Every structure is written in structure tokens, then in C-alpha cells.
Amino acid sequence: MSTSSGRMDGRAWGVLLVLCGAIFLEGIDVAMLNVALPSIRADLGLSTGMLSGVVSAYVLGYGGFMLLGGRTADLLGRRRMFLLWLTVFLVFSGLGGFATEGWMLLVARFATGVAAAFMAPAGLSLITGNFPEGPQRTKALGVYAGTAAGGFSLGLVAGGLLASFGWRWVFFAPVILSAVILLAAIPLIRDSRAPERPAGGFDLAGAFSITGAMLLLVYGVVRLEHPGNGWAGTVGTFAAGLALLAAFIVIERRAANPLVRLGILRSGPLVRANLGALLFLSSFAGFQFLVTLYLQELRGWNTLQTGLAMLVIGVDTVLAPTLTPRLVNRFGNVPVLFGGMVLATLAYVLFLPVGLDWAYTAMLPTMILLGLAFSLAYGPLTMAAVDGVDEHEHGLAGGLLYTAMQFGTALGLSAVTAVNVAALGDGGSPEAGLTALQVALVVPVVAGVLGAVVTAFGLRGRKTPEIPRPVPVETSA
């Protein structure tokens, strides 16, 4: 699918656009729902707990099944898994649009999250499998990462616009987009390699134990948002999740064909990339939640105005596929990633003195810096996560990365919510709300600093720039 000069031909671009469409679909789906939540609550009369559950259900499905989804793509075929779970995504997104009760939304969002957990790592491994290592793969991953990040930022605007016509369109629009992607994917997408045929069979014990562990751990993080639920239950949830995780490690050590080869965790670049991804997404998810709270509840902006305010973050859609690959090829992957982490942290710091009468021009530097940060960090994170990983484990590496991203998203939301609620106390005035929000804004700053520190360890001992080996490791949120 390439010319002798390394350029991509028409078919290669077709494959890339289809796979980018799928990751864009996942990003825009999450973002549109976040903006439409107030409209959903007003129409269905949902409690605050049920409303947050609609968001948490997706995170539970995504984070709980991601590792299983990544390995299944390697074992059962990436194309097969991609097409199957894209179809499931389409069906349950549509069912969410017909929901008349809160529990219907919970089921639809959980199933959609599970579908994304299988679809995202399959799509990323198809990217690396269909484009040869070197500048062409770097460019393909740059376009892919820019589309993923752009889907979220553009989804904020699309969600605000669609919610103004009716919140159900937030669910129906992804159905139309996913149907188009599916029809194009069937003739275009091909597997670059035959799926593995493990002699000892599929590691069912490992699959059940790691999925159970991930579900419990993500649920424990989600419970942190609601201290009133009782600390005993939260601690018990974490303990059960850690116990299952320990059981999983024992099972994998003894399994003839382990679901996750534990030796992959000895890779320094992979571990740093996953920690960096967790902290980067944690900081942004928390910040985005607080900004939405600030604009809509403290300033009285509507959903469309809120989305438009954050539209500039979508500059990464243009810069990630054009500027970032050039920087990576010249300076190396880790320095570019480190630059993105630093810019994100600076963006959060600039927003700390926010006031009730801030003009948008005062917020704009933060939004611009975040757009640049996503441009520099998102693509290199996917590259670093698979640096040195064998091709037959690309799906697994992708599952690890997207699991870290979902944990980061859940942790960031839970942390800022808990801090904001604690700082607000019984205060009900706009001034008290602003003070609580400013305290909670420290959480994204701390997460950004930690992400930059983790990434900085990858700079040690680096003497000359290297063209990274972006092999497939995705997602929302």
C-alpha cells in the first residue's frame, strides 16, 4: 500500500481514513454525551447519582474489558474483531437514543463501552500492521492520534449543537457515522497477519480474572466521587479488585498460553508511556469537567457556548498529523511527548486564578496551550507504548495503553469531584463555588507535573534523536 518513495497510495489512505473514522467516532461519542447530560437529566428526571452512572457505565465497560479486547484481537483476528464490535457499537448507541428510563441508558452505555474496548485496540493494531515501520507509520499514527484527540474536542461542539435539537440525536448521530464507516471498512480493511492459534487453548481463567479485576478497580475509582456511599464499600471494592489482580498474576505465571505475557511489563518505555497516558488523561478529564461546571453553572453559558469555548483545543486535529510527525522524526519521540506534558501543565496553571467575571480572552491561552499539548503528546504516547513490542503483541500493548487512559479518565473525574465537593461544603453562593473550583483545579496541575516527571525519565541517556518504532498498541471522556 505504498509507493517506492514511501508515500501512501489511494488504498492506504482509504484504510487510514476508515480506521481514523472509528477512533473519531469513539471520541465524539463520549464528548457529545458529556455536554448533553443536563438535557438528559431534565427530560428523564434522573437523579445526580443516576446521571453520573450514565458516564461511569461507559468507563466500566471500556476499562473493564480493554485488556481482554486487546489480546482477543491478536488471537481471533484484528479485522474480525474490529468489524464485529463496530457493529455492536452501532446497535447499542442507537438503543441509547430510544431510552425512556435511566436503567436503559446505563445498559446501553455499558455495552457501548465494552464494544469500544474491543474495537479500539483492534483498530490501532490494524494501523501498525498495515503501514510499514518508519516515516509512513509515523505519519499514519500521527493522523490517527490527531483524529482521536480531535474527536473529543470537536464532539463538545457537536454535542452542544445536537442537544439544542434534542439530546437523543447525541445517540443517533454516531449510528449514522458508524454505519458509513462499517460499509467502507468491509471491502477496505485486511488483516496484515494471520491470527494466533494458541496450542493450549484460550486462557479463560486469565480472561475472567483480569476482566473482573478491572471492573472492580474502575468501579472503586468511580465510587470515590461519592463519599456518601460509605468508605467501607469503596475499600472493599478495591480490595476485591486487587485480590483478583493477584490471582490473575498467579494464573498467568502458570498458563501455557497466558492472556498477558507478564514479561511485556519489563519494558521501560511501555511502562512510562502507560503511566504518562494515565496522568495526561487524568489531568485533562478533571480539567474539562471543572471548566464545564464553571461555564454552565457559575457563568450560565449554554451547551453550545461551552462547546465553542473549547473548540480551539481541536487544533490538534490539524497539527497532530502535520507538525508532530516532523518533530518526532527530527527530535525523537520522547522529547516531543515531554514538551506536550509541559504545555498541558502550564495550561492548567494559567487557569488557576479564574474569576467570575473572566472574559473569554483570559481563558483562551489555556485552550490554545491544551490544543498544542494534545498535538504533541497524544500521538507520541501511542508510539512510545509499543516501542520495542513484537508485532504479535501489538493488540495487547494497545489494550494496556487504552486501559491506562480509561483509568486516568475515571481517576481524574473522581479526584476533582471529591475535592470540589469537600471544598464547597455547605456553601451555595457563586463565590463559594468559585473557591471550591479553584481548589479542585490544583488536581490537574499536580497530575500534569507528575506526567512530565515520568516522561522526563525517558530523556535520560538519550544522545541522538531516533525515529520511533510506532507499533500498534483506544480509547473516551
Image: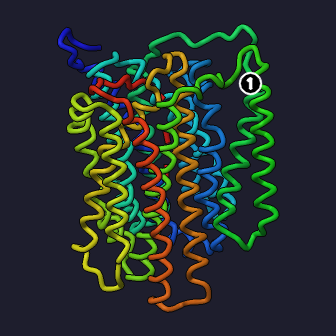
At label 1, the amino acid type is: Glu
Find residue 326 and report its horizontal and vertical position in percent.
Answer: 21, 32
Q: Is residue 432 left or right of residue 139?
A: right
Please tell me which residue lies in front, 222 or 245: 245
Query: What sort of colour scheme is used for the picture?
Result: rainbow
Please tell me which residue lies in front, 270 or 43: 270
Please tell me which residue lies in front, 315 or 32: 315
Residue furthest out toward the front: 461
User: Can residue 180 be seen by looking at this rendering?
Assistant: no
Name the element at disc 1.
Answer: helix
Q: Which residue is pictured at 61% across the width and 84% down the height?
A: 425
Q: Is residue 277 left or right of residue 354?
A: right
Q: Which residue is pictured at 35% across the width and 36% down the height?
A: 334
Find residue 413 and report its horizontal and vertical position in percent.
Answer: 54, 61
- The quarter of the image holding the N terminus is top left
Measured along the vertical axis of the image, is residue 310 above or below residue 247? below
User: Can residue 301 be seen by looking at this rendering?
Assistant: yes
Residue furthest out toward the left: 5
- Mark 1 = which residue? 252
Find residue 137 and report its horizontal and vertical position in percent.
Answer: 32, 23
Tell me the crowding category of disc 1: few under 14, some 14 to 19, or many 20 or more residues within 10 angstroms, Cα based.
some
For the image shown, how many numbered marks are present on the structure?
A: 1
Residue 5: name its quadrant: top left
Measured along the vertical axis of the image, is residue 411 above or below residue 52? above
Find residue 264 and report its horizontal and vertical position in percent.
Answer: 58, 24
Measured along the vertical axis of the image, is residue 63 above or below residue 225? above
Q: Which residue is pictured at 30% across the width and 43% down the height?
A: 376
Q: Which residue is pictured at 39% across the width and 69% down the height?
A: 164
